Image: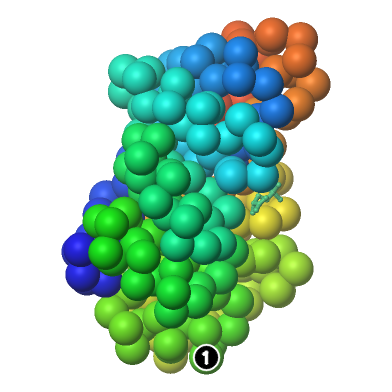
Amino acid sequence: MTPQQASAKAAEICRLAPVVPVLVIDDLAFARPLAEALVAGGLPALEVTLRTPVALDVIRAMAEVPGGVVGAGTLLTPADVKAAKAAGAMFGVSPGATDRLLDACEEHDLPLLAGAATSSEVMALLERGYTVQKFFPAEANGGAPALKAIGAPLPQVSFCPTGGISLANARDYLSLSNVLCVGGSWVAPKGLMEKGDWAGITALAAEAAALPR
Ligand code: 3PG
């Protein structure tokens, strides 16, 4: 998959809903009901971070949920890419970008949302052909005003900002012309998962899905 093809696919996935839930899941039993709850609320694209021992099994379980488009987050190495793809991930997300990681995603046909935080990082990815990128960590890097400023000289790059985004500030990003969607963990709080409050998570997802873009 070329970087151009990866960007087209990433844009398609980002346009599915205003918010991509960023999921850190400790218990495999949460996978199916959580994915069903988020999809029911109107958030089909789901990022499962590879930060817990069960993450790959969670991706496998969520990949079977009708209507869901499950991706793997926190991809750091070529081995992560292979494992994510084998588990059924439809896309990948990484906090940054390295040549080895980009090579692996292109080789294994996994559309990647690679992270960039500065103009030079955005330009390096753009030079390689990536026109859809993740802005990370969004709030710590100056938030929506910073991303707006990056968009002035680099309007050809679109972003999914993540890191510190919530219902309260998501609109600031979504109103920017260079933002396709935002990513955030607020729609799947650990407390609600542990209580099995899937209706509560569907309500949070519905609220996020209704955000204007
Ligand atoms: C992350 O990598 O954890 C994501 O950027 C989500 O960040 P958040 O928990 O601040 O939404």
12 lies above or below 187: below
Measured as percent of width and height from the top left, residue 66 is found at 32, 18
Question: Which of 172 and 17 lies nearest the eye of the viewer?
Answer: 17
In the current view of this chain or complex, which residue is farthest to the front? 79
Left or right of residue 136, residue 12 in this image: left
Left or right of residue 76, residue 124 in this image: left
Please tell me which residue is depicted at 39% across the width and 51% down the height of the picture.
82
Measured as percent of width and height from the top left, residue 87 is found at 40, 35
> Residue 2 lies in what quarter of the image?
bottom left
Amino acid residing under circle 1: Ser
Measured as percent of width and height from the top left, residue 204 is found at 61, 25
Determine the secondary structure under disc 1: helix
> Residue 71 lies in what quarter of the image?
top left
Q: Which residue is mark 1?
A: 120
Please tell me which residue is depicted at 49% across the width and 76% down the height of the picture.
98
122 lies above or below 34: below
Asked if the residue at label 1 sits under 8 Å from ligand 1, the reply is no
The quadrant in which the N terminus is found is bottom left
Measured as percent of width and height from the top left, residue 39 is found at 43, 22
Q: Say whether residue 115 is visible.
A: yes
Q: Say whether residue 209 is visible.
A: no
Question: Is the image coloured rainbow, by chain, by secondary structure, or in one colour?
Answer: rainbow
Q: Are there few (<14), some (14-19), or many (20+) residues within 10 Å of tag 1?
A: few
Marks counted in the figure total 1
In the current view of this chain or complex, which residue is farthest to the right? 191
Left or right of residue 145, residue 17 in this image: left
Please tell me which residue is depicted at 65% across the width and 65% down the height of the picture.
138
